[in-house]
Image (cartoon, rainbow, N blue to C red):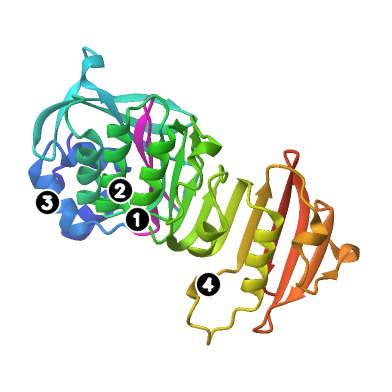
Amino acid sequence: MAIPLFKLPILVIKLVFEVMGFIDIFVLTNTSSKTKQFVKNLLTCKNQEMHIFMGKEAFFFSLLRDSHPTFLEQIHWKSGERQPQEVFYLKIGTIDHVPSEFLPAKDGHAALAVYLNENINHGEVIYNAIIDLFKIPIKHIRMDLNDFPNEIHRSWIIFFNENLSTASLLEIVGKCTFRDYFWILDYVNTKNMFAMRADQTDFSDDYGHHCADYSFEGESIVVSDGRWICREDLRSIDARSINIARILISVDDINKYLRDWKNMKKEDRLDLTFLNLKELTIIFEYERNRENLLEGLEATNEDLIMPVDVLNQWSFKMANGDKCTVTYAKYEGDDKFEFRVGN
């Protein structure tokens, strides 16, 4: 026998919705405008987060609760051209009669597929429908550039800047041209963590330091292909944590950067990019002279207390009195140096 849900007391209705899964609520509210209004007025989302994956093979939104971190619910976009015969229909945003189906659970994860034509901005349509209901903070966005034309990359970045820039982490992977790589660097707008893990398919030394005017201001930045970075670029990054791999900057340039960082004081307002920096990781593409790298820093050897996974450890004192610990290790055959400020 069906339960007359809307004849129950308001608090009971609220409790019913609070124990339902995201997908159940999403389906229910996108088939009934009355139910949607109830949910929007009654439901408060706490301790929940959303992850978004954008790629050619998959485009989906993962929703989870802190109380059940291993149980994911996913809403997938799929091309309308691959719509199966047996579906049910939802109204998503302003689009009526959207074919949908429940997908077989994998690894215990519940999943819903929504079939939209490729000429519709499907990501934005589904995102707006989800956020209209749940108001969930975005934890992680992963964009896979493989096999997508640059106009798709750019539409994703524009969508990110307009709607998703508060996400805790934006991660970009895959491959793209040198031109597209720097377009993304120039246009991404985030104050949190930005991980640029994409590879450039046509990088050449002939390009020179194309991004000499590059600057970044945020909590953290990771660059897995730092061949393009010069010392001026490094000085223009204002972040608490900087992690750059495959870097080609000379030891002398890195040493100059480190000495400037060491001597930075809060009252020195002429160079603010160093004020927030607490962690610096540099991975050279080939072996460098460690003594030259640390020259002039008055570093003290700490090999006797170094962790087991490093080859050498030093420390030096910053101008503001803080201690900076330096570790040297091998990372996939390359030289890896980590600098951490704080006792």
Q: Which residue is mark 4?
A: 276
Mark sitting on residue 160: 2
Disc 1 residue type (three-letter): Asn
Mark sitting on residue 37: 3
Q: Is residue 172 above or below residue 87?
A: below
- Label the magenta part by its dominant secondary structure: strand
- Where does residue 87 sit, x and y in percent of width and height? 21, 20
Disc 2 residue type (three-letter): Phe
Among numbered discs 1 and 4, the one appearing first in the sequence: 1
Disc 3 residue type (three-letter): Gln
Which residue is drawn at the image coordinates 34% and 55% (left, top)? 189
Which residue is drawn at the image coordinates 21% and 36% (left, top)? 27
Disc 4 residue type (three-letter): Asn
Mark 2 residue element? helix
- Where does residue 110 sit, x and y in percent of width and height? 38, 33
- State yes or no: discs 2 and 1 in contact (Cβ < 8 Å): yes
| Quadrant of the rendering where the N terminus is positioned | top left
Q: Residues within 10 Å of mark 1 (few under 14, many from 20)?
A: many
Mark 3 residue element? helix
Is residue 197 something that shows in the picture? Answer: yes
The residue sitting at the front extreme is 206
Is residue 51 something that shows in the picture? Answer: no
Question: Which quadrant of the view contains residue 91?
Answer: top left
Among numbered discs 3 and 1, the one appearing first in the sequence: 3
Which residue is drawn at the image coordinates 43% and 55% (left, top)? 214
